[in-house]
């Protein structure tokens, strides 16, 4: 039987809202990232573009995943603010990817997060350069913020996730698959890389900060393994949900162009599996994500709630 708190949480998620205990870190994260950008010795117009790209309206799911993965694996005495630089680095890479994906040479999109894409807001040249800046700044932030023994594995995680994300974008837009793959196998290859890899990096980086921060030489492998299994499941789940939203929601509701994947002839889960089978896959991945967190016990509660939201989000 659900407690009153659990029932309230379920109602909030069903209504499309994250419970306050899960969403609260967003304000702290936005303040932190704004301070980072404002402190940069860069041209004023470039700083403006960085703010526009990284701090516009959005769910901040990747920073929240970093934060709540930290909470799920940390010693109770550690302050979660220790993971803010890692969360910011992940979000910078995510923002870079959106800015570049929207460019005329790739997705050629005019709308992102309910407002003009950066190249429409400023210029194509500025969008390219701001994306480049976000990517390189992310790695510098890690080494400016953590001891080398922690910054190095964090940078490796981010580099692996970023390169996999780029590979996924290549598969999605330019092909390059090995022969003999089914459409469903191609889809999984695209999305485990394009979307899932950075989500895995976000979660693992939170756990690495949490389990290495007390001066340990290596992170707690059992906790890191649990977080990794969870992240792989929600990374693919996120994209299946995204594909469903692309064909079931309007542009006005999503804040980005609806139906563009179908129009572009891209592989999507609803196109390959059908809508009902895609929804079944979401439920299956959601269950796998929840099971992965069980070894972490009550500490993983907010991370589990965040996965619940990701499974039923409407934008």
Image (cartoon, rainbow, N blue to C red):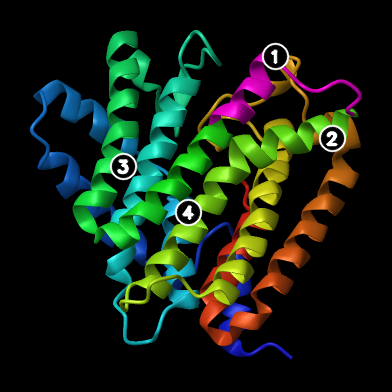
Identify residue for label 4: 202
Which image quadrant is residue 234 in?
A: bottom right
Identify residue for label 1: 264
Q: Does residue 29 appear in the picture of this structure?
A: yes
Can you give x and y, in whole percent of width and height, for residue 98 in the image? 46, 29
Crowd around label 1: few <14 · some 14–19 · many ≥20 (10 Å): few
Query: How far apart are the two marked residues, 3 and 4, measured between alpha carbons?
Result: 14 Å
Q: Earlier in the sequence, mark 3 or mark 1?
A: 3
Secondary structure of the residue carrying numbered label 1: loop
Q: Residue at x 74, y 39 (%)?
A: 244
Crowd around label 4: few <14 · some 14–19 · many ≥20 (10 Å): many
Q: Earlier in the sequence, mark 3 or mark 2?
A: 3
Query: How far apart are the two marked residues, 2 and 1, measured between alpha carbons?
Result: 19 Å
Query: How far apart are the two marked residues, 2 and 4, measured between alpha carbons?
Result: 24 Å
Relative to 10, say whether 168 is above or below.
above
In the picture, the quarter occupied by the C terminus is top right
Verify whether residue 174 appears in magenta.
Answer: yes
Verify whether residue 111 appears in magenta.
Answer: no
Left or right: residue 14 versus residue 33 is: right
Which of discs 2 and 1 lies nearer the camera? The answer is: 2
Q: Do the residues bearing badges 2 and 4 touch, measured as CB atoms within 8 Å?
A: no
Which of discs 3 and 2 lies nearer the camera? The answer is: 3
Secondary structure of the residue carrying numbered label 4: helix
Identify residue for label 2: 185
Query: How far apart are the two marked residues, 1 and 4, measured between alpha carbons?
Result: 29 Å
Q: Identify which residue, 122 or 62, lies in the foreground.
A: 62
Question: The magenta stretch spans which residues?
Answer: 166-181
Relative to 266, say whether 16 is above or below.
below
In the picture, the quarter occupied by the N terminus is bottom right
């Amino acid at each position: 039987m659900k407690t009153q708190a659990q029932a309230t949480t379920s109602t909030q998620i069903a209504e499309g809202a994250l419970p306050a205990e899960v969403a609260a870190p967003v304000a702290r994260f936005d303040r932190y990232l704004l301070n980072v950008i404002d402190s940069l010795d860069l041209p004023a117009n470039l700083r403006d573009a960085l703010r526009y790209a990284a701090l516009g309206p959005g769910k901040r799911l990747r920073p929240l995943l970093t934060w709540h993965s930290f909470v799920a694996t940390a010693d109770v005495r550690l302050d979660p603010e220790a993971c803010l630089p890692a969360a910011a680095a992940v979000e910078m890479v995510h923002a870079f990817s959106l800015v570049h994906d929207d460019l005329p040479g790739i997705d050629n999109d005019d709308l992102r997060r309910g407002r003009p894409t950066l190249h429409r807001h400023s210029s194509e040249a500025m969008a390219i350069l701001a994306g480049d800046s976000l990517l390189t700044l992310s790695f510098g932030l890690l080494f400016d913020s953590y001891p080398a023994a922690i910054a190095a594995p964090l940078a490796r995680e981010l580099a692996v996730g970023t390169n996999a994300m780029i590979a996924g974008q290549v598969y999605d837009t330019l092909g390059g698959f090995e022969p003999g793959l089914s459409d469903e196998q191609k889809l999984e290859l695209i999305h485990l890389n394009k979307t899932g890899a950075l989500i895995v990096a976000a979660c693992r980086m939170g756990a690495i900060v949490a389990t290495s921060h007390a001066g340990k030489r290596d992170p707690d492998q059992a906790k890191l393994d649990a977080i990794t299994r969870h992240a792989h499941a929600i990374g693919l789940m996120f994209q299946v949900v995204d594909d469903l939203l692309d064909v079931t929601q309007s542009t006005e509701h999503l804040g980005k162009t609806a139906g563009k994947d179908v129009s572009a002839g891209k592989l999507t889960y609803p196109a390959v599996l059908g809508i009902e089978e895609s929804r079944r896959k979401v439920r299956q991945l959601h269950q796998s994500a929840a099971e992965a967190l069980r070894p972490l016990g009550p500490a993983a509660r907010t991370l589990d709630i965040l996965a619940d939201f990701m499974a039923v989000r409407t934008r």
